[in-house]
Amino acid sequence: MVSIKYDILSIQERANKALKDGKDVINGCAGMLFSDNKSLVTYDLINQKIASSFTSYLGYPSILGSKEYEDGVLNWIFNENLIEIKNKYYISFATTIGGTGAISMLFNYFSKNNGVGLISDIYWPNYKNIAEIENLELYSHLLINKNNGFNLVSLERKLKELVNKNYKVLVIINDPCQNPTGFCLTNEEYIQLFNILNKYYQNVSLMMDIAYLDYAPMGFIFPKVFLESNIKFDTYLTFSASKSFGIYGMRLGALIGLVHNQEKVHKQEEDFKAFSRSIYSCPNNSAMGPISEVLNDQDLCFKLRQDINKQRNRLENIGNLLSKALNDLKIPHFPYTGGFYLTFFVDDALDFCKALEEKNIYFSPIGKNRIRIAVSSLCEKDILKLKRRLS
């Protein structure tokens, strides 16, 4: 008897087949943003710029990307805080193949420098795959405390243990809107996190995976809190143009370092060049060029932020409806604050997903007793159907 595979791609294949067979499918598997009519959400001004100018960028770009792209991304992420960021920190920058490429590049850098990773016990499964490829050993702390807040006590306990073993520790935080839970840190939790990391700053760096920064209902609060704190450790941000601008298949991202030593910037950028050159040669210029044109035009950026905010508000509404439906069904789940995903708890995730598929519901098991729903692929009608089928 052939066992059913429960990796995301296999689940997606079964969902697509059921849809082609005329079944009324609820597909909460795909980690892309879809509209209410199930078409991929893209942004007209991005599409128009790519269509009109991508052939102007068919040549090889610089290994770490263009200055125009760096300027545009830094402005997009830090906005009114950028001048102060530049005054306080030396910035390293590498254009990458998606946010995943940025994470791979950073994991590779730390693995070669006696580094290990410290991550929450609930995380995007691909972190583990990347860490294994790049030979970065991962350790974990509890994500949530008994009050459904960020478990700073567990993080510090494990961090202290690793530092005492003379490791260089990369603390990995996926915020805002963590994949796979939708969990977000608060201002106060950031302040407490920074205070903890400052205690061990000589042996600790912070990685912020900010793939969902544009879909956080409270906005991207990290830069303001970061600047108000006396940060002693080095910080790295992994950015996904794929997620922010709906260009998943074009694979564009960035790795940004905020460090305290200019010599370290030069060394890092040389390491990043070597990584890029040996793995994928150079960034996707046909994506980087048009996106750079958009991000360096204030009027286009303003319009793009408006368009993204509309989708963010729609996504938040769907997530809140899903959270309420699960509460009504007495299904426990992580607190959903915003973003593409929500995770709920069951006794046996594989058995539960098998039972769901018999009802034409396709979700992703992410552990023995946890199941991830891609809120981003659902609409309000799906939530009503889900509640009826599980009642």
Image: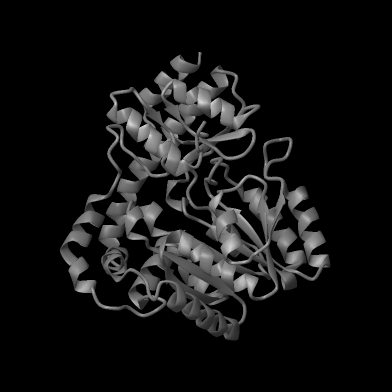
Provide residue 164's location: percent of width, then percent of height: 83, 66
Of the pair 4 and 325, the residue shown nearer to us: 4
Question: Is 52 situated left or right of 312 in this image?
Answer: left
* For residue 52, above or below residue 336: below
Q: Is residue 323 visible?
A: yes
Which quadrant of the figure has residue 191?
A: bottom right
Provide residue 358's location: percent of width, then percent of height: 45, 21
Q: Residue at x 57, y 70 (%)?
A: 108
Q: Residue at x 22, y 50 (%)?
A: 44
Of the pair 259 and 266, the residue shown nearer to us: 266
Q: Residue at x 47, y 74 (%)?
A: 93
State the scheme by which the image is colored: one colour
The residue sitting at the left extreme is 52
Of the pair 109 and 143, the residue shown nearer to us: 109
Provide residue 240's location: percent of width, then percent of height: 43, 58
Q: Residue at x 55, y 60 (%)?
A: 130
Question: Is 173 situated left or right of 56 in this image?
Answer: right
Give the tally of numbered discs: 0
* For residue 95, above or below residue 251: below
Of the pair 131 and 209, the residue shown nearer to us: 131
Question: Is 367 situated left or right of 12 in this image?
Answer: right
Q: Is residue 324 visible?
A: no
Provide residue 332's location: percent of width, then percent of height: 62, 26
Which quadrant of the figure has residue 281?
A: bottom left
